[in-house]
Image: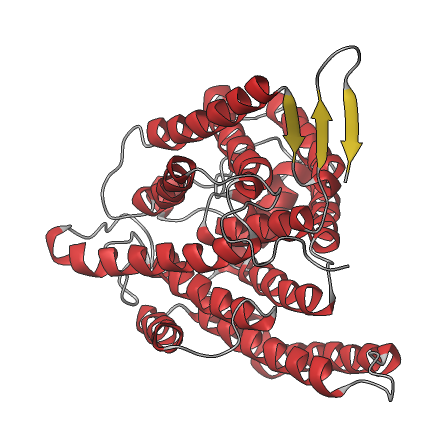
Amino acid sequence: MELKNWAGSQLSATGEKVYWLDKILFCVWLLVPAYQYSDLHVENSRVGFWGIAGVLIFRTLMRDLLRRKFTVASRGLLVPFALVFGWKFFELMRAPGQINTALLFFFDFLITYICCLIIAPRIFSVQSWLIEFRRINVMAVLLAIVAHPFVPDRTDMAGWDKGESWAFAHPNIAAMYPLTIYLLTIVIFGIGVKRGFRWFDIFCVAFSLSTLALTGSRTTLVVAFITTLLALFNIIVIKYLKDDKGHETHAIKTALKFCAMLAIGGCIYFVYAAMGRQALDTLFSGRLSFAADVLWSAKDLVIGVGLMPPGANLLADTTTRGAGIDGLYTNLIYGEGYVGLVIFAIAMFGLRRMANVNPRCRAFFGVTLVSCLVFGVTETHFWLLASPLTALVAVLASTLGTQSGGYVTVFVGKPLPRLIVR
């Protein structure tokens, strides 16, 4: 299957005309989380986040009403994310803390994925999304560096001084942005949006890796290393592992992946056996022991304790400890149970299937997804929050699938509505 409108830079993934006001609003909406994650003590930041999203949704609906034609992007993700939203609503009704706080988090999550999966493919094509989102992240990091001398550091987060964070609240938060720039550059060349390096591409690679090293974020540095290995592996597979007729040799690819999984599993076991549990917990800044204590304190891990903001728990106060539950999977199991973890896996498979357009897109979207899943071992910003990594994965999957025909158009007219499935 080939992508449609690949060269149509003036068209969105759904083949519609792109309005510059929509594109500007969406770019500003993407920068709101960077403002929330800054050293500024932000109050009522949801006004901007929800307000801009509301304007985008309103403009899209009004155009559909005037044209009497409704376009629903990301058709292949409707069922998986209906499960996600339905289960989160069920957990919202069981929220153990204040229902108002849980409700705010639920709407944050809902708005994030409505904008990324439904609105973004009607504003961006795959090419425009990758190119412009990289520019936005470069601008966010540069603004944070320039504004740092004028913004006092926040000291209420554990580990805030372990590396450079500039105007961001924590080095791990700051590291997300150069990691996103690095991932975007790899995907841009991996799927063939660009063929040759230019000075800005070289700048993005050097800038992202240097700023990433300055943050001292161990998790993000490991993710960047894994990303590089996966990208090199895919380049070798795509370029060299073909038979005489030019078809991919799936048996060799499967064998190589299996060997890689065994090697990674062996390395993890070797590190655990050599260091011991206590030393490994120290390396992870006490995250493992605290996660175990929190999980053991839960009354029901099958359906969880109920919807709570990321990091929040019933065992320790995050304000006095300086940190909450670290790690995406610990948060999912604690709040939404093993059922929520299974639904999360279904959503990830849905994103993976949505991006299965051709071998290159499948391979390099897989690099992005695996990198973000590894990031989620110790951090919570992917999936649960509107971070650059969340936007990268969600919008990339939705634009890839939508641009290859994965959307539904409903014409409302006389005498009967007409449904066209592409």
Q: Nearer the viewer, residue 323 or 399?
A: 399
Task: Specify whether 259 is left or right of 14.
Answer: right
Q: Residue at x 86, y 86 (%)?
A: 243
Task: Specify whether 270 is left or right of 153.
Answer: right
Q: How many marks?
A: 0
Q: Is residue 338 visible?
A: yes
Q: Nearer the viewer, residue 332 or 354?
A: 354
Q: Quadrant of residue 73?
A: top right
Q: Residue furthest front?
A: 414
Q: Position of residue 125 (x, y in %)?
A: 55, 50
Q: Residue at x 56, y 26 (%)?
A: 96
In the picture shown, does residue 378 fall above or below 406?
below
Q: Residue at x 49, y 58 (%)?
A: 130
Q: Quadrant of the C terminus?
A: top right
Q: Residue furthest left?
A: 150
Q: Position of residue 365 (x, y in %)?
A: 63, 62
Q: Position of residue 381 (x, y in %)?
A: 48, 50
Q: Is residue 339 visible?
A: no
